[in-house]
Image: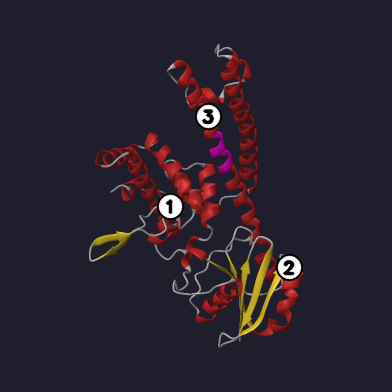
Amino acid sequence: MKFCGIDLHSNNSVVVVTDEADRVLVSRRCPNELKPILSLLEPHRDELVGVVVESTYNWYWLVDGLMVVGLDVKLANPVAMKRYDGLKHSDDKDDAAFLAHLLRLGILPTGYIHPPHERALRDLARKRIQLVRTRTQHILAVENIAARQFGHSFSCNEVKGFSATSVDRLGLSTDVALAMKANVAVIQALEVQIASLESRLLQQVKLRPEYSLLKTMPGVGEVLATVIMLETGDIGRFAQVGNFASYARCVESAHYSNGKKKGEGNAKNGNAYLIWSFIEAANFARRFSEDAKRFFEKKKAKTNGVVATKALAHKLARASYHILKEKQPFDAKRCFA
């Protein structure tokens, strides 16, 4: 049996093939092109147990290309892999060989490979989130300008309705007005693009029956249900509710020993888009659900608004898991008991 590890970089890939004794049979640096990599693996293909590719920002073309020709591809989770700190020397060849070594031992921490057709829509939903965040930055910039000039600010909805003409009516100096108009112009452009992406998402994404149930949860509408569905994938890949909550970054990252906190782990290990979705849902839920509002206010009284919002997001994440697993609508009594 043979094992392959590929250390993927921005413009090249180091391919290593090892045997059952971890002896390196092949080690070569290839350009980021599928053909030379496949040619390198072809003589070993019949004996290859699998190919490991580290999850980097640019893995799509390689993983998809290897899977198309029938190779068993694993996507390695780099956050969950830690090599011995005492190593004196390490390079790309060693890193690729280490991936093959973990595959041989059967202890490779893997990531989920979304189907390509869902991945494209997921990335479209991520682009929408990026644009929404950018729009928020410019809205806050307009609010800050108004606060500096008038001693009070405008609401978010008022800012969204601004135009160059409405800025002129404010009576600001030329330079201040120009600065505000620049923000307003960007907000208007982003509004058009966000609406376009939302239209495409709602047109192309058909919520699976279990995900349609998410809309019974307070704070979750069509868009958030779509994002949660695309980011979660198959709910069956999470053994327990805690695994899903951790993946959604809703669980505290801490290390304890003898009942005492000794440090913290990687708080960013998980899906940044799921925590964004559940935070958004929490902000809406506490406004429109009495049960959610009551839970939020109780937590806020003991801590602060940020911690209370995160706690409510955690509740909604756990509720989402049970909704998807059991295919049952949201139960407020069970969630906020």
Task: Give the amino acid type for the residue marked by disc 1 in the picture.
Answer: Ser
Q: Check if mark 1's residue and mark 3's residue have beta carbons within 8 Å.
A: no
| The N terminus: image quadrant | bottom right
Residue 217 quadrant: top left
Rendered residue at 59%/51% (across/down): 122
Q: Which residues are magenta?
A: 130-135
Position above or below: 61 against 86: above
Q: Main secondary structure of the magenta part?
A: helix
Q: Which residue is mark 1?
A: 320
**Residue 296 left/right relative to 97:** left
Q: Secondary structure at mark 1?
A: helix
Q: Which residue is mark 2?
A: 34
Q: Earlier in the sequence, mark 1 or mark 3?
A: 3
Task: Give the amino acid type for the residue marked by disc 3 in the picture.
Answer: Ile
Q: Earlier in the sequence, mark 1 or mark 2?
A: 2
- In reply to whether residue 303 is colored magenta, the answer given is no
Q: Which residue is mark 3?
A: 139
Residue 40 horizontal/vertical position (percent): 73, 77
**Residue 111 left/right relative to 289:** right
Spatial separation of the CA atoms under disc 2 and disc 3: 44 Å
